[in-house]
Image: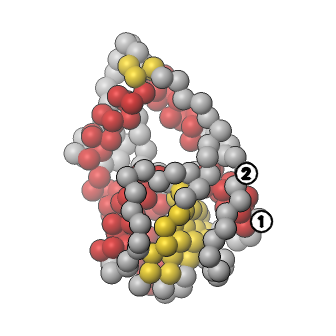
Amino acid sequence: MKVIIMRHSRVKYIWKKWYTSDEFDKACKEYDSSFVEYTEQDFPYFNHKNIYISTLSRSRETAISIFGQTHLRQTELIDEVPLRSAFDSKIKLPLWFWNFVGRIQWFFNIARQIEGRLITKKRAKSFVNMLCRDGEDAIVITHGFFMHTLLNAFKNEGFRYEKSNIHYKTGSYVVVEK
């Protein structure tokens, strides 16, 4: 069984460098509803029958730009890990700070974040189990931060892959096999 896991295309959104907590939360929502740039992708020869996308529009738009109007299997199991401000602040703080502290809260399952690491791991495991039950090759178009958890879930189920990155660029992909 072979699965191509791809990060969505580049999002047409320009982040500011500084935000209050409310501004950061608003920017995250705007990013989630922004369009993506057109993508051409040169996948290895592959059965394009099973294409899974998240419920976020950037995943669907990426799939359509690559494969055209075809049957796409949409599931929230591969949505990006939601992010929000780590605390309320009227003081503008740098974007990197909000991202970093929010992901630290995610790691430690702090309730301020919409979803903690344990829930993310369960989602990824559920998705991998679903694919294994189907037993067919698939293409998965998901999101950068979630890809790390998803790849670990595949690894835990005996899949192997060659490359692992700290940061997956938009449009990049990893092939996992079992």
- Is 127 left, or right, of 14 in this rendering? left
State whether residue 19 is above or below residue 10.
above
Which amino acid lies under the numbered mark 2 shown in the image of this protein? Tyr
- Image x and y of residue 136, in percent: 53, 85
Dot 2 surroundings within 10 Å: few (below 14), some, or many (20 or more)? some
Point out the frontmost of discs 2 and 1. Answer: 2
Residue at image position (63%, 71%) is: 43
User: Pointer 2: what residue?
Assistant: 38
Q: To which residue does mark 1 refer?
A: 69
In this view, 103 is above or below 98: below
- The image quadrant of residue 164 is bottom left
Mark 1, secondary structure of its residue: loop
* Residue 8 visible to the viewer: no
Q: Which residue occupies 57% across, 71% down?
A: 139
Question: Residue 61: x and y, percent?
Answer: 68, 54
Is the C terminus in the top left, top right, bottom left or bottom right quadrant? bottom left
Residue 151 left/right relative to 67: left
Please report whichever mark, 2 or 1, sits nearer to the chain's N-terminal start: 2
| Colour convention of the picture | secondary structure
Where residue 5 appears, x then y in whole percent? 51, 67
Q: Position of residue 8 (x, y in %)?
A: 58, 54
The span from disc 2 to disc 1 (Cα, nearest Å) is: 14 Å
Residue at x 27% of width, y 39% of height: 105
**Three-letter residue code for mark 1:** Gln
Q: In this view, does 59 lie to the left or right of 114?
A: right
Hey, which quadrant is residue 130 in on the image? bottom left
Foreground: 117 or 175? 175
Residue ranking furthest to the top: 91
